[in-house]
């Protein structure tokens, strides 16, 4: 535990800068963050980001572009995910208005899970964190591995049901409160521990 707090203190400034970036996201980038989170399941976040940068250059949001050739080399399940991106583009106006309309964070996450094809609890939490919302757990393999290491959970579940996701999120929040490091900062800290980079 002492090592974790030491590591956090070493990276605190950089982590806080990153979290600040999320809070100051430009409206134009909300759509691309949604696309990024649709691409990340079972694919590298870094590769997903490379695809998003390409799509941005091509102005995918406003132009009639097929994302499949861009995703093909870098993203698993690129056929499905290409379709999910096109669906997200089609319905983004509605999604965007719900982001302003729904004030309860858990309700907003549920709305995304129910209405955006390709987003589960993890991806919806990831999207909301990346656009400045706080205190949602992004339970990917890096995070679960670290939660097990710090005995927050006894084992990594083979599948994450909704009930199990909420149970682990609650335990993660208690752990975060106990050691005095925010959930969002811990997420970036665990990620950097696994990948060597403070990313998103």
Image (cartoon, rainbow, N blue to C red):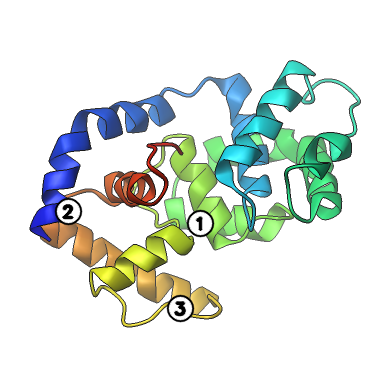
- Which of discs 2 and 3 lies nearer the camera? The answer is 2
Q: Is residue 180 visible?
A: no
Percent from the top left, x then y, of residue 16? 26, 31
Q: Earlier in the sequence, mark 3 or mark 1?
A: 1
The quarter holding residue 57 reads top right
The quarter holding residue 166 reads bottom left
Cα distance between the residues tagged 2 and 3: 25 Å
Cα distance between the residues tagged 1 and 2: 32 Å
Crowding near pointer 3: few (<14 within 10 Å), some, many (20+)? few
Percent from the top left, x then y, of residue 88? 76, 42
Determine whether the residue tagged by mark 1 lies in a helix, strand or loop. Answer: helix
Q: Nearer the viewer, residue 95 or 20?
A: 20
Residue 164 has which mark? 3
Percent from the top left, x then y, of residue 38? 67, 48
Tag 2 residue: 4
Residue 107 has which mark? 1
Q: Is residue 113 visible?
A: yes
Q: Earlier in the sequence, mark 2 or mark 3?
A: 2
């Amino acid at each position: 535990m002492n090592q974790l707090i030491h590591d956090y203190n070493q990276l605190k400034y950089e982590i806080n800068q990153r979290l600040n970036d999320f809070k100051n996201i430009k409206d134009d980038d909300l759509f691309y963050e949604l696309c990024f989170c649709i691409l990340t399941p079972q694919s590298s976040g870094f590769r997903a980001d490379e695809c998003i940068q390409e799509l941005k250059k091509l102005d995918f949001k406003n132009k009639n572009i097929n994302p499949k050739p861009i995703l093909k080399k870098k993203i698993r399940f690129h056929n499905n995910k290409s379709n999910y991106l096109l669906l997200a583009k089609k319905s983004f106006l509605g999604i965007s208005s719900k982001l302003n309309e729904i004030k309860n964070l858990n309700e907003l996450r549920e709305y995304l899970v129910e209405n955006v094809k390709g987003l589960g609890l993890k991806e919806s939490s990831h999207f909301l964190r990346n656009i400045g919302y706080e205190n949602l757990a992004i339970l990917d393999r890096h995070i679960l591995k670290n939660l097990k290491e710090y005995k927050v959970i006894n084992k990594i579940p083979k599948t994450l049901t909704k009930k199990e996701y909420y149970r682990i999120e609650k335990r993660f929040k208690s752990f975060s409160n106990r050691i005095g490091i925010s959930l969002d900062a811990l997420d970036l800290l665990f990620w950097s521990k696994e990948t060597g980079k403070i990313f998103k």
